[in-house]
Image (cartoon, rainbow, N blue to C red):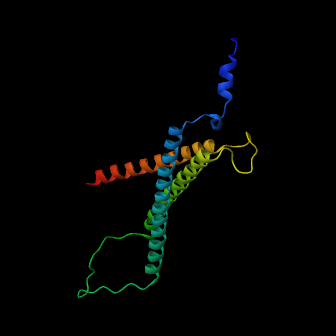
C-alpha cells in the first residue's frame, strides 16, 4: 500500500462550487450561459412548433378520413395523386415526428435550465434556502443538465444523419 498524499485528497474532495473563478472566467461563463439560453429557447420554440404541426396534421388527417370522399369522374380528375397512404403509415410517421419534436423540446428545456444555473452560480454564492456548503450547487446542476442536453442533441444529430443517408440512397 502506498501512503496517500493529504494535499491530493483535499484537492479531490473539493466540490465544483469551491473552484475559484477570476473576472475573465466569470464573464466567459456568463456569455456562454446567455448563448445556451438563446439556443435552449430556440429549441423549445422549434420543438413546440413541430409538435403543434404534428397535432394539426393528425387532426386534419382524422377529419379528412371522416368526411365523405368526393366521387372521381373523368371530368374532375385530382390535381395531384401522391399514392396510397394507409392510416397505419400515417400514424407511424406522425408518431416518429412527434417523438423527435419532444426530444428537441426536452433538449431545449435542459439547455435553458443549464444556462439559468450557470447564471445563478456566477451571480450568487449558494442556492436559495440552503445553508452554505450543503446540497447541490448551481454549477453541479448546470453541468448535469448540460450533459443530458448534449446527449439528447447527439441523438438528434444521429437521427438527422440517418435520414440524410436514407434520402441519399433514394436518389
Report the residue that reaches farthest toward the right.
131
Closest to the observer: 157 or 42? 42
Say above or below: 4 vs 169: above
In the rendered image, the quadrant that contains the C terminus is bottom left
Say above or below: 61 vs 152: below
Q: Is residue 152 left or right of residue 159?
A: right
Q: Is residue 136 left or right of residue 112?
A: right
Closest to the observer: 151 or 72? 151
In the rendered image, the quadrant that contains the N terminus is top right
**Where residue 96 appears, x then y in whole percent?**
47, 60
**Where residue 109 appears, x then y in whole percent?**
55, 56
For image coordinates 57% across by 46% down, the residue present is 118
**Where residue 89 appears, x then y in whole percent?**
43, 65
**Where residue 163 appears, x then y in whole percent?**
37, 53
Say above or below: 156 vs 50: above
Q: Is residue 171 left or right of residue 4?
A: left
Closest to the observer: 103 or 32? 32
For image coordinates 59% across by 43% down, the residue present is 144
Closest to the observer: 96 or 126? 126
Amino acid at each position: 500500500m502506498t501512503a496517500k498524499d493529504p494535499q491530493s485528497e483535499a484537492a479531490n474532495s473539493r466540490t465544483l462550487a469551491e473552484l475559484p473563478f477570476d473576472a475573465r472566467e466569470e464573464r466567459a461563463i456568463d456569455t456562454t450561459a446567455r448563448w445556451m439560453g438563446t439556443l435552449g429557447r430556440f429549441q423549445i420554440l422549434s420543438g413546440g412548433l413541430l409538435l403543434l404541426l404534428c397535432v394539426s396534421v393528425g387532426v386534419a388527417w382524422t377529419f379528412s378520413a371522416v368526411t365523405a370522399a368526393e366521387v372521381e369522374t373523368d371530368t374532375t380528375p385530382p390535381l395531384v395523386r401522391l399514392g396510397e397512404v394507409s392510416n397505419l403509415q400515417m400514424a407511424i410517421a406522425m408518431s416518429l415526428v412527434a417523438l423527435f419534436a419532444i426530444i428537441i423540446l426536452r433538449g431545449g428545456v435542459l439547455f435553458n435550465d443549464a444556462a439559468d444555473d450557470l447564471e445563478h452560480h456566477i451571480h450568487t454564492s449558494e442556492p436559495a434556502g440552503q445553508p452554505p456548503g450543503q446540497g447541490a450547487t448551481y454549477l453541479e446542476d448546470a453541468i448535469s443538465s448540460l450533459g443530458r442536453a448534449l446527449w439528447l442533441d447527439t441523438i438528434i444529430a444521429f437521427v438527422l444523419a440517418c435520414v440524410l443517408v436514407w434520402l441519399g440512397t433514394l436518389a
